Image (cartoon, helix red, strand yellow):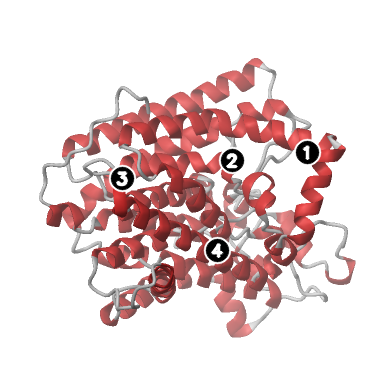
Amino acid sequence: MTSTSLPAPRTGKPPAERKRRLIGIDIARFVAVFGMFNIHFGVPFVEGHPEIVVAEISSGRSTALFTFLAGVSLAMLSGRDVPPTGAALRDARLRIAVRAGLLLVFGVALAKATEATGFLLTVIIAFYGLYFLLAVPFVRMSARGLGISAVVAALVGPQLSFLLRTWMAHDDVARGVVDAVNAVDPGHLIAELGLFDLLLLGFYPAASYLSLVLAGMAVGRLDLRSPKVRLWLAGSGLVLACASYWGSDGLVAAVGGLPDLSAQGTVPIEHPDWLLAHTPHSGTTFELLGSLGVVLVILPACLELAERAGRWLSPLAKAGSMALTLYALHAGVMAWQIVVGGWPLSGVPDFLAKLASMGPALPHDIPDLPAFPPDGHRPEGFVAFLNIYMAELFLAFSILFALVWRRYFARGPLEAAVSEGVRWIVAKINRRPVTSAAGTSAVGTSAAVTSAAVTSAAGAGRVDAGQRRRTGSPDAARSPSR
């Protein structure tokens, strides 16, 4: 994405046509949800090598797609292709800021409620809250300005994060400031999701991932109904992905390879050469730009599919429109799997399966250790069946639940709760009567923003999706009991 190649926003379409919901965006959200399921529950209906390939493709890119679509929805909420000004700008900024606060609170609460997952799952919703808050100053920008900002953030953010974290680790004053803030930061005290965790030190630090939100806002300012714009996005994405991945591989080879360690969330300050990698969830410039390129191909494809086969894809779109609800449910289910001892039954790396079954011999010096059963048991009977086939069962549940719920309600339960909370708080701040938001354009777009605010994340987990099924042989990709 360059400042000279971004198409200018189109403003000639009637307001009603510009505001009509783009179902393809909901389908793209479902793609991200599906990637999240692949990472945490396993890939449904396939085994062996194909399962490994799909899981590896999902790793990291699902998070990028969620984050990017959050930016697209912020653009939809704030004027679509026409940046807001005056009172409309103030109202959009207020709504986004309030939504950010609600997501921060909900994200911290969900992380605390699912802390049994330990290092296997990082709840991304609180990170989304900070992304939204940091995006508020950019709301008035055009597609061109947002595109430039996204490129600068991708080029500078990961390197600046590395320098700041290095300084914080070696400077007593800086470390003292961080410790003092963490000592009174409720997010950090409750779930280790305080300001510094969300900005620099956590698994999806805003210093790196804000670039994807800004890129999404830039794309959301374009005329996404235009075939030319979609073709331009897909072509640019393909070029960007290839250039990022190939460029990273070339630079890594030039420095003699990388240390044999895992760099997820942030690049270890002891190994600056990891900044050249494009490893999923590493948050490097190459990973961000490569994932952005893939996302720029996925979104136009989903928009085209929605126009050509929207009726047949409606169940997927409905599930995608409830991404926040499905994300929270999936996090709760994963916590339950770990507590009852059934998580390894769906097929995980050998070392994690052994760790989950060690019982009293489980080493307790491992940071953020999941709450595996203290006796190391694995469930039997119906509970074992649920865990073995969780990938298939949860996927089917997600679609059926969305179909039934959306038959009677316009929004998912958590999407409606957040949107109504925003409406109520904004009305109180503006000192005007709290009226029903149903049927207003703000509701339609705010529901879209809420749906984008999910984790994981897809990929909001710390188990590399490619490693989840890498158990040595195709036959080992599933539990023997399956």
User: Which amino acid type is shown beneath numbered disc 1?
Assistant: Met
User: Which amino acid type is shown beneath numbered disc 2?
Assistant: Ala
The residues tagged by marks 2 and 3 sit, at their Cα atoms, a distance apart of 21 Å
Which mark lies nearer to you, 4 or 3?
A: 3
The residues tagged by marks 3 and 1 sit, at their Cα atoms, a distance apart of 36 Å
Q: Label 3 crowding class (10 Å Cα cut-off): few <14, some 14-19, many 20+? A: many
Mark seen at residue 168: 1
Mark 3 falls on what kind of element?
helix
Evaluate if marks 4 and 1 touch, with contact meaning CB atoms under 8 Å apart: no
Mark seen at residue 41: 4
Q: Label 4 crowding class (10 Å Cα cut-off): few <14, some 14-19, many 20+? A: many
The residues tagged by marks 4 and 3 sit, at their Cα atoms, a distance apart of 31 Å
Q: Label 1 crowding class (10 Å Cα cut-off): few <14, some 14-19, many 20+? A: some
Whichever of callouts 3 and 1 sits on the residue coming sooner in the sequence is 1
Front residue of this view, candidates 183 and 338: 183
- Residue 44: percent from the left, percent from the top? 46, 62
User: Which amino acid type is shown beneath numbered disc 4?
Assistant: Phe
User: Which amino acid type is shown beneath numbered disc 3?
Assistant: Gly
For disc 2, the marked residue is 207
For disc 3, the marked residue is 220
Locate residue 258 relative to residue 248 in the image: left or right: right
Locate residue 263 relative to residue 458 in the image: left or right: right
Quadrant the N terminus occupies: top left
Give the image quarter of residue 165: top right
Whichever of callouts 4 and 3 sits on the residue coming sooner in the sequence is 4
The residues tagged by marks 2 and 4 sit, at their Cα atoms, a distance apart of 29 Å
Residue 373 shows up from this direction: yes
Mark 1 falls on what kind of element?
helix
Whichever of callouts 4 and 1 sits on the residue coming sooner in the sequence is 4
